[in-house]
Image: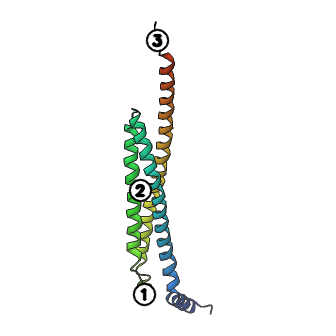
Amino acid sequence: DTDNLTLKTDVQSITKGFRIYAFFVPKIHVLATADTLDNVSDKMESLLGKLETRIAEAKVKGLNTASLDIILTDLKAKIADARIQAQAAKDLVIPLTPDGYPGNKTVLQSARAKLVVGHKNLQLAKKDIQKIIKDLRVLNKESSASTTTSSTTTTTTP
């Protein structure tokens, strides 16, 4: 079995005989990654609700939260798009069967590309969350400092 013709025949036999593995492993990876994106999106949306509450509290205190509102809107869009990308990847690979492999390899690659976009959106969403938390801390410190300053400078005259 050292000639090229035998080698070519063996490779074709392995590819056709074991294509189920060549197909199902990438399909399972796509589905698992899409589920992970959904789970991370769920956690971020939970945190998003808490951030909205904190921003609303800052507004009640009279603090300027316009920049936070912009970041919050961007954050919501990124999380929503990550969910859309994950669902699109699932929708692409779920109907695929091993019989279509290797012809459906491009569909698997397209699904992976959607997952990459979704992952990047969640990375950017994480940065937005960190920015909102940082800015809220700064606003609260400024609010505390200004409240302390105004209460110490108030004096009554007899």
Mark carried by residue 79 = 2
- Mark 1, secondary structure of its residue: helix
**Mark 2 vs mark 1, CA separation in Å:** 35 Å
Marks 1/3: CA distance?
88 Å
Q: Which residue is mark 3?
A: 156
Looking at marks 2 and 1 on the same chain, the residue that comes earlier in the sequence is marked by: 2
| Residue at x-position 38% and y-position 80% | 95
Q: Residues within 10 Å of mark 1 (few under 14, many from 20)?
A: few
Whether residue 106 can be seen here: no
* Nearest-to-viewer mark from 1 and 3: 3
Q: Is residue 61 above or below residue 118?
A: above
Instruction: Please name which of the two marks, 2 or 1, marks the residue nearer to the observer.
Output: 2
Quadrant in the picture for the N terminus? bottom right
Q: Is residue 57 above or below residue 34?
A: above
Q: Could you tell me residue 85's position as x and y percent?
A: 39, 64
Gap in angstroms between the C-alphas marked 2 and 3 = 53 Å
Q: For mark 1, what is the residue?
A: 99
Would residue 70 be found to the left or right of residue 47 on screen? left
Rendered image: mark on residue 8: none
Which of the marked residues, 1 or 3, is nearer the chain's N terminus?
Answer: 1
- Dot 2 alpha-carbon crowd within 10 angstroms: few under 14, some 14 to 19, many 20 or more: many
Q: At 51% across and 72% down in the image, what residue appears? A: 29
